[in-house]
Amino acid sequence: MKKTVIVLIALLISADLITAQTNYTPVNAESKVHFTIKNFGIKTGGDFTGIKGNIKFSAANCTASLFDVTVDASTIDTDNESRDEHLRQAEYFDVERYKTIQFVSTKVVLSTVPNRYYVYGNITIKGVTKPVEFGFGAVQKNGGYLFDGEFKIDRRDFGVGGSSVSMSDKLTVSLSVFAN
């Protein structure tokens, strides 16, 4: 009887360890949030920094995972300071009123590809929240995880860029986020 109780306790502890997700914090210096968009038919892009947030992730129990991260909208960098200042204005990112761009997951599921997952969530830009879903990788690195993924959004859904006809409506966001 005593052995049975010890075995049951050991199994419960192991199950908790397997299913428990771990909290991670994004490391801004080792992360990249990049976007690309066509403007006058030419592909251009930029980066955001100032990534912050909380990531709860378990490869063994991805359904318990949660991503709640932001980037600082005023950090937009397209390698052209004049353009960056223009993009910070109200017609684009309105960084005076909307300091951050936020992503919060609602569901994470395992992909059929090893170390790949699928995340569903909401992205908020300029106070407008829209659903987004995309595949991502999670590779262990230096006591944390390197997450990478890519998704597309329509800038007009968020009121970014006004009615510009020279700029494409669709843009691609590429993520490489290290969290530990």
Image (tube, helix red, strand yellow):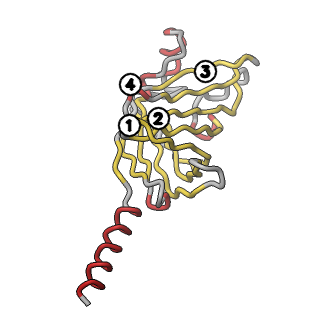
| Residue farthest to the right, as pictured | 41
Q: Which marked residue is nearer to the observer: mark 3 or mark 4?
A: 4
Query: Alpha-carbon neighbours of circle 3 within 10 Å: few (<14), some, or many (≥20)?
Result: some
- In 3D space, how far apart are the residues under numbered discs 1 and 2 (Cα atoms)? 7 Å
Q: What residue is at 50 percent from the left and 15 percent from the top?
A: 84
- In 3D space, how far apart are the residues under numbered discs 2 and 3 (Cα atoms)? 18 Å
Residue 45 image offset from top left, x and y in percent:
60, 21
Query: Would you name the residue on which mark 1 appears?
Result: 26
Query: Would you name the residue on which mark 4 appears?
Result: 29
Q: What residue is at 43 percent from the left and 35 percent from the top?
A: 178
Query: Would you name the residue on which mark 3 appears?
Result: 45
The kind of residue on which mark 3 rests is Gly
Give the vertical position of 83 relative to 176 (above or below): above
Q: Are marks 3 and 4 in contact (CB under 8 Å)?
A: no
Q: Quadrant of residue 16?
A: bottom left
Give the vertical position of 82 relative to 17 (above or below): above
Number of marks = 4
Marked residue nearer the N-terminal end (3 or 1): 1
Q: Quadrant of residue 12?
A: bottom left
The kind of residue on which mark 2 rests is Val
| Residue farthest to the bottom, as pictured | 1
Query: Would you name the residue on which mark 2 appears?
Result: 177
Task: Give the position of the N terminus as an image quadrant.
Answer: bottom left
Task: Give the position of the C terminus as an image quadrant.
Answer: top left
Q: Which marked residue is nearer to the observer: mark 3 or mark 1?
A: 1
Q: What residue is at 62 percent from the left and 39 percent from the top?
A: 151
Q: Secondary structure at mark 2?
A: strand
Horizontal arrangement in the rendering, residue 39 relative to residue 52 (left or right): right
Give the vertical position of 65 relative to 24 (above or below): below
Marked residue nearer the N-terminal end (3 or 4): 4
- In 3D space, how far apart are the residues under numbered discs 3 and 1 (Cα atoms)? 22 Å
Q: What residue is at 64 percent from the left and 32 percent from the top?
A: 172
